Amino acid sequence: MCLGVPLRLIETKGETGTAEMGGIKMRVNLSFVENPKPGDYAIVHAGFAITIMDERSAEETMDVIRRCIDMGDEGREK
């Protein structure tokens, strides 16, 4: 299964940029999205920004991902 996660762009330079989430930064390829700019949120999959989304949608998506992680943690033995 593949998963794209929303990351906030903090720097853009041509077809590459830097995105971050929770203090973790990564280089991303921006060639698939139009006019990306710092402050935008992008769904990133395998190092490629595949779509730009608004902040509210990014937060809602991350909430769903966090809930899924929490559900998985409940089933683990402590």
Image (cartoon, rainbow, N blue to C red):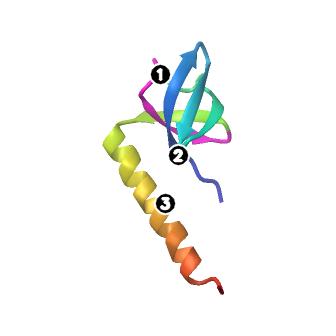
What whole-number distance in Å separates the C-alpha atoms at marks 1 and 2?
Answer: 20 Å
- In this orientation, which residue lies closer to the viewer: 13 or 46? 13
Asked which quadrant contains residue 15, the reply is top right
Residue type for callout 2 = Gly
What whole-number distance in Å separates the C-alpha atoms at marks 1 and 3?
Answer: 24 Å
Which numbered marker is on residue 62?
A: none
Q: Which circle's residue, 2 or 3, is located before the other in the chain? A: 2
- Identity of the residue drawn at 43% across and 61% down: 64
Residue with the mark numbered 3: 65
Q: Which circle's residue, 1 or 3, is located before the other in the chain? A: 1
Q: Is residue 70 above or below residue 40?
A: below
Residue with the mark numbered 2: 22
Disc 1 secondary structure class: loop
Q: Which circle's residue, 1 or 2, is located before the other in the chain? A: 2
Q: Is residue 34 above or below residue 6?
A: above
Residue with the mark numbered 1: 36
Front position among marks 1 and 2: 2
User: Does the magenta segment cover residue 44?
Assistant: yes
Residue type for callout 1 = Pro
- Identity of the residue drawn at 53% across and 42% down: 21
User: Does the magenta segment cover residue 61?
Assistant: no
What whole-number distance in Å separates the C-alpha atoms at marks 2 and 3?
Answer: 14 Å
- Identity of the residue drawn at 46% across and 22% down: 38
Residue type for callout 3 = Ile
